[in-house]
Amino acid sequence: QRRGIPEAILADGKSVEQVCSLAATALETTDRALVTRVTDDQLAAIGSRLVDPADSSVTLERRSRTVRLMTGSYDPPSLEATVGIVTAGSVDVPIADEAHVVCSDAGATVDRVDDVGVAALSRTLDQVDRFREADVLIVAAGREGALPTVIAGLVDTPVIGLPVSSGYGFGGDGEAALAGMLQSCTVLSVVNVDAGFVAGGQATLVAQAVDAARGENSPQ
Amino acid sequence: QRRGIPEAILADGKSVEQVCSLAATALETTDRALVTRVTDDQLAAIGSRLVDPADSSVTLERRSRTVRLMTGSYDPPSLEATVGIVTAGSVDVPIADEAHVVCSDAGATVDRVDDVGVAALSRTLDQVDRFREADVLIVAAGREGALPTVIAGLVDTPVIGLPVSSGYGFGGDGEAALAGMLQSCTVLSVVNVDAGFVAGGQATLVAQAVDAARGENSPQ
Amino acid sequence: QRRGIPEAILADGKSVEQVCSLAATALETTDRALVTRVTDDQLAAIGSRLVDPADSSVTLERRSRTVRLMTGSYDPPSLEATVGIVTAGSVDVPIADEAHVVCSDAGATVDRVDDVGVAALSRTLDQVDRFREADVLIVAAGREGALPTVIAGLVDTPVIGLPVSSGYGFGGDGEAALAGMLQSCTVLSVVNVDAGFVAGGQATLVAQAVDAARGENSPQ
Amino acid sequence: QRRGIPEAILADGKSVEQVCSLAATALETTDRALVTRVTDDQLAAIGSRLVDPADSSVTLERRSRTVRLMTGSYDPPSLEATVGIVTAGSVDVPIADEAHVVCSDAGATVDRVDDVGVAALSRTLDQVDRFREADVLIVAAGREGALPTVIAGLVDTPVIGLPVSSGYGFGGDGEAALAGMLQSCTVLSVVNVDAGFVAGGQATLVAQAVDAARGENSPQ
Amino acid sequence: QRRGIPEAILADGKSVEQVCSLAATALETTDRALVTRVTDDQLAAIGSRLVDPADSSVTLERRSRTVRLMTGSYDPPSLEATVGIVTAGSVDVPIADEAHVVCSDAGATVDRVDDVGVAALSRTLDQVDRFREADVLIVAAGREGALPTVIAGLVDTPVIGLPVSSGYGFGGDGEAALAGMLQSCTVLSVVNVDAGFVAGGQATLVAQAVDAARGENSPQ
Amino acid sequence: QRRGIPEAILADGKSVEQVCSLAATALETTDRALVTRVTDDQLAAIGSRLVDPADSSVTLERRSRTVRLMTGSYDPPSLEATVGIVTAGSVDVPIADEAHVVCSDAGATVDRVDDVGVAALSRTLDQVDRFREADVLIVAAGREGALPTVIAGLVDTPVIGLPVSSGYGFGGDGEAALAGMLQSCTVLSVVNVDAGFVAGGQATLVAQAVDAARGENSPQ
Amino acid sequence: QRRGIPEAILADGKSVEQVCSLAATALETTDRALVTRVTDDQLAAIGSRLVDPADSSVTLERRSRTVRLMTGSYDPPSLEATVGIVTAGSVDVPIADEAHVVCSDAGATVDRVDDVGVAALSRTLDQVDRFREADVLIVAAGREGALPTVIAGLVDTPVIGLPVSSGYGFGGDGEAALAGMLQSCTVLSVVNVDAGFVAGGQATLVAQAVDAARGENSPQ
Amino acid sequence: QRRGIPEAILADGKSVEQVCSLAATALETTDRALVTRVTDDQLAAIGSRLVDPADSSVTLERRSRTVRLMTGSYDPPSLEATVGIVTAGSVDVPIADEAHVVCSDAGATVDRVDDVGVAALSRTLDQVDRFREADVLIVAAGREGALPTVIAGLVDTPVIGLPVSSGYGFGGDGEAALAGMLQSCTVLSVVNVDAGFVAGGQATLVAQAVDAARGENSPQ
Ligand SMILES: Nc1ncnc2c1ncn2[C@@H]1O[C@H](COP(=O)(O)O)[C@@H](O)[C@H]1O
Ligand SMILES: Nc1ncnc2c1ncn2[C@@H]1O[C@H](COP(=O)(O)O)[C@@H](O)[C@H]1O
Ligand SMILES: Nc1ncnc2c1ncn2[C@@H]1O[C@H](COP(=O)(O)O)[C@@H](O)[C@H]1O
Ligand SMILES: Nc1ncnc2c1ncn2[C@@H]1O[C@H](COP(=O)(O)O)[C@@H](O)[C@H]1O
Ligand SMILES: [Mg+2]
Ligand SMILES: [Mg+2]
Ligand SMILES: [Mg+2]
Ligand SMILES: [Mg+2]
Ligand SMILES: [Mg+2]
Ligand SMILES: [Mg+2]
Ligand SMILES: [Mg+2]
Ligand SMILES: [Mg+2]
């Protein structure tokens, strides 16, 4: 049986109708739906059309602009593996949240550390032990994007750099952060600018590999 | 005890003297040296100065432009984990070889599949089972760089895309491949153009995480 | 007598008045009008001003944002040639529709196949026979734009790659798809990002050449 | 039986040994070999090692840096279709020659018109009738690359624009020509900068489609 | 006494108040004002505040988004020189109009030829004699920007290329046209994308030089 | 009779044989030849093959890498007009020299001012009167390319900016200078990076227009 | 005790609530708050919620879109050092104002000189003595960004170039100005496009170093 | 009396003759010469032609490719100020050396710290006190260029970022480092890629300002 990363609906550029209908179908066929990058209107429509406040047959969880729906009969997966998700500043939070929901939805434990940017290095250094305990790390950073480089120099955990399009001026659309992570003098791999979903998907695949390895010899 | 990725000497832009001296020091202090991107001159000098053909106290292994030296007393690491390394065409081989040596040197099993480019799709499809057996995959491709996208759509193994600067014209310096992998409609992470060392390092970190997980519950 | 590609009015950046007036003139002088990239306002005005619901003297056909008007006296051309039009995902549909209308309007048979992106390769492989039956193929794809490369490797039909500006981050404005198609390791030619009109025009010219060849020796 | 475009060996970046060995294998197995972008050394070696001047069992034809070898037993294909190949200036000739050999090798008739650049427009206008008689046109141009645009405005033949990396300064590496052809205000499709092989391959596929159509109803 | 190019107020990014106040001051101190890139609001305010319909003491002339105001006491300059201004398509008109007003305002005769794009070459060829009679030519073109190249090959008049940001996709913001004009295989000079004011200013300086030369030996 | 700019042979990328043969033909048919961008080898060959030291039937003049040949029977043109040519630094000299030879060859008076870069502003200010006396100015500058902007602010003469590819780092290939001249806050037109030939050609066309104007009313 | 640059709240992309709450906290804990890039709404809310018109316990100062709040108990720092801030044109003022407030807030004397662009060089030359009296200069300029280069050639004061994203066409987003300042033929350092805050911060750090040096030997 | 930064001769692209002659003139007129970016040949020629080993009237000092010559009568300047110069890795050394010689030559004390890259953060943290003691810091770094950002977050000293063109792949020509420093989330200013001379010059100007401030109140 294939594991793979969770199916998701990218709401960006779709109408309210399309998003609701795709989510309804997902719920009906799989007891679960994941919708990323919803607008306020899409979110409101999903809430009012798909969730019945009177009974708890469908539950809705939200993180920034990502929404997860489950029916009562949904049997969520569970992984014996931890994904660390780290952000440099508050503007990186919504993008990191996309990754967060993907990993949680796949059953990984997520250890979240926010606001440890390079400008205040001691906050980063204070968290090194937590970073080391994760099986894989996603590090989101905008502007010059130096945080993944710094963290990857301190730990042996694989680091996935997630560049964010905060900032302005030359390279401010995330290209400075992307280029910096690609040129990193420490070892890490990278996803595209603002691609929280991809970072979460890739971390999930690593977590699944680790979970499978843990399971191989585990006493039943 | 930290694992980390193997130390290496980047010969690019260093003199013959510098490279030999750095390699000699590494051998003396760690019984081992890894040198990437050697020129013919650097290679010859390493061979004649550091390896004594009369006795086998120092052995030299070479793959493309990457060289690995070991003394008899070196106790190489061993990982219970497999890295699959795939190339699209023959121009991708030397870059993939950099990754290959890094992973081997760290003790991972490397399963190498060459020449399965998208233009001859059936060769790729024939190898899907091998791809699925690896714990992590490095897929090297130049030109439009579509191979990692295609493979990541067929397997649950995490894929690290390695863009190669083959090609000419617009995007021919590896930027088309890099951009394509970053935009991939399947989930994968990416390293910089020609960064075989980084791809090998990142795959090694994933392999170490898997190996550690395998070791946790293994009967002693 | 010259054939050429159908005349069209590019509504983009024109006022409602300009578009209606140009379309009215085209209808009067040629019994036909083709308008691409209409806004909702332009579309409504065309409908209410140029089409009389009471009598069917002018008919209106619409696909996405492209509109075709014909009077009862219009004698449409007909080509003995098939253009295959393929899209990778739903965001590519409106751009492919521009090409679709141009080819239909010129009298070609259009064989349309939607939603066969590289991430689900089996759907592509299932359609190979249909692709082979076309005289020329237009393949529209955004993000990394790998679909034309994959299809061109499977068929002998000439493929025109049509890159689409879906996606975000580095190369997300269609440049990754464009660069990938230009670097394709299989043979294909390319039009500009989102240039559905040009792809349709070029396919029409090939279809006309094939139709003319078919006609040369056909028994009268 | 599939037709496809002729197999070719890209000599660029290969050693003299590799090129000769690949060509020898091609000759043995298919009685024919096509080698593009040969250096002087590679060319000399091919000549001396694969062609025996004493007997004419292997013949060698050369155009610029492209070489075609055939044994006496080779039965070349033949297409009832004409590819027009046009160059703007003398620097475009070697790139156009790559396309030329590919089309000839596939059996198409090639009608070649050199040195009709936009700076001397009357030379272009004088050739319009020849351009119209071709089934498909390749138009190679460097610098601002306006020639395909001008020709496509004068004929109904499908035009494949082939940008060439002549020129210097901003856009002088062929990007100005490429961008200009992609933005062309007349309908045409494009291949990458200096991609003579791809232009020839795409023209061959169109010529094969036309040839097949001609053949369908032809009296046996 | 210095001549120079006419002073103008760039309305872009200024408030209605600022624009009216700057124009009022210019009128008061020089009996004349030139305002470029006005919005509808700015235009309305200029009209109602600075022009009294009851008496004709201030007259207002408008071309696209450029506005010229003169009091009754203004003594306009006059040049014995002609500037030809040519556009390729209707989208180029507003940008060319900026240049037009600057030249007129400086007293040059403007010979305006619209809609002679490369796609319909015969319309261009029909006007060659008019182009030759001008002392200097401004040629505005968007998309691939080939028109200045074509015209400069047909005349000895100095040509100033004016690239326009019409178009979409790669190079569609005017960069394809700019790069094409810079790479032109005929001799011309260029101004920035959409810089109608600069093109008009430079043509004015040439017209002034010609006018001065005409005046040197003219019998008094 | 058309004037136009002088014909020239661009030696760049041509063989010694080609250059000599083209120059010989030009000499025979027009009593004159102009060769730009010659290498040392090409220059030596031109000297030894086309110029006979024993008799002065062919004279050779050289400026940087541009060479001009004339037979005794050549009747050079003469223009009553002055082109000012200004360089910012010594690295700009060879590019400015290309322009210089083109203008001289067309018969214009050239007033040359070297080494008046912006870093030593007083040297520029000292020459303003000379700049004002020219009918048209070419201003060559590399690095940030500010000199044409500064000079155009001080004079009413039309200025043609000539960006030069001196410098290193970001924009060091002439793009910073080109972009700066295109964005100039004073009025000027521009040619491509290192396009001395084009700058000279455009200045020649302006000089011819001025010369013609001077001639119109001149007493015979 | 560390000095450092003043803390600031970047309002860009934050909600009205977030900005007011961050400013309130800053006021409470440090008796002072600095908010950059406020919108009209954010500004109004700050005024009405944090400032009580009835008593003067909190004062508000504003420059362009930057706002500074202080309670009565705030003891502002004071530096014995002068920062000169120079703008080329009126569009540069709001960006320079960001720098201005940062320097004032840190206690530096600010000597402000507006509207001395390169197009009117005499206005620049008139101010050279003032420029020389500053301890450090910030020079803000858009378009071609030549002003810092010109000023740095006239004074020994360190110059910090501040490129501004005024302008349109190629390089009009501030990249021409940035590249020009980086390529400057006089010595200066640079901050990112529109980074008034960073320019002010860096000038503050230099002013603090000068102030400290002045204080070392000053008689107490 | 103006101070300014030291005059230097940029040997890059000059002949051996030119460099020697310029250096000889500098020595004669100012008793001192500074030559940057010398080749081996230029260096040898300077040594043999300008320095007489028999007597010590001219002394030569060299750092990487920068050379400083002084006669016995040269009275070097002296500044009471310290410039800290920091490099991330060994490839940054030659570029930092250019800055080093400029600062030394102007009389500043240089405190040099090599090889404290971000990959080994503890080496950086160990040196923070030294960084704090400098009056101004130059921090040279290639690849992702994160070091200046990290250091500027730890000290109040003004930091000048010096990006270096080490690295390969996307952004490997120093653009990743440049963009990262421009986007830095800590305050710093930047010079162009590899512009060691400019960094040294700017640091010198700050050191001179500090030195002058120290001198103002110093007891005579
Ligand atoms: N081929 C390579 N590409 C990128 N980084 C490399 C490569 N080879 C070695 N390295 C890294 O560069 C460091 C060596 O740098 P160096 O001290 O200059 O020899 C090693 O520790 C690796 O982290
Ligand atoms: N969607 C489109 N994309 C590109 N070109 C188009 C498009 N629609 C129409 N055109 C072309 O633009 C011309 C119409 O331009 P206009 O005269 O401005 O309406 C037509 O003749 C077509 O050649
Ligand atoms: N240095 C140059 N830069 C640009 N164009 C040149 C240059 N020298 C000559 N040309 C142009 O190139 C043409 C010669 O091309 P060719 O026939 O290849 O020698 C001349 O007629 C000129 O228009
Ligand atoms: N206009 C600005 N441009 C760049 N950085 C700024 C600006 N204003 C404030 N900052 C910086 O951004 C930080 C505030 O970020 P935040 O916590 O998101 O408010 C401050 O500490 C400053 O270092
Ligand atoms: Mg690490
Ligand atoms: Mg997968
Ligand atoms: Mg095919
Ligand atoms: Mg046509
Ligand atoms: Mg001409
Ligand atoms: Mg002027
Ligand atoms: Mg200075
Ligand atoms: Mg700091």
Image (cartoon, coloured by chain):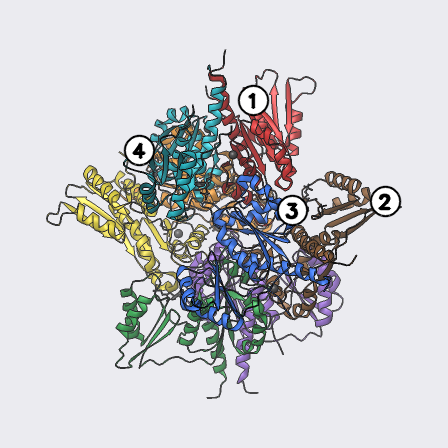
Chain colours: A yellow, B orange, C cyan, D red, E blue, F brown, G green, H purple
Task: Tell me the residue that label 3 is attached to.
Answer: E155
Crowd tier of the residue under label 3, counting other residues whose Cα lies within 10 Å: few below 14, some 14–19, many 20 or above? some
Along the horizontal axis of the image, is G94 left or right of F58? left
Which element carries disc 3, helix, strand or loop?
Answer: loop
Q: Is mark 3 within 8 Å of ligand 9?
A: yes
Crowd tier of the residue under label 4, counting other residues whose Cα lies within 10 Å: few below 14, some 14–19, many 20 or above? few
Give the distance between the C-alpha atoms of the residues marked 1 and 4, in whole angstroms: 52 Å
Where in the figure is residue C123, as x and y percent of width and height? 33, 30
What residue occupies the far bottom of the structure in this picture?
G220
Task: Tell me the residue that label 2 is attached to.
Answer: F52
User: In the depicted view, which residue is nearer to us: F28 or B39?
Assistant: F28
Q: Which is in the foreground here, disc 4 or disc 2?
A: 4
Q: Chain of mark 3?
A: E
Same subunit, labels 4 and 2: the answer reads no
Q: Which is in the foreground here, disc 1 or disc 4?
A: 4
Query: Where H146 sits versus B160, above or below?
Result: below
Name the kind of residue labelled 4 in the image. Answer: Ser
Whether residue B114 is visible: no
Task: Tell me the residue that label 4 is attached to.
Answer: C56
Give the distance between the C-alpha atoms of the residues marked 3 and 4, in whole angstroms: 53 Å
Same subunit, labels 1 and 4: the answer reads no
Name the kind of residue labelled 2 in the image. Answer: Asp
What residue occupies the far right of the structure in this picture?
F54
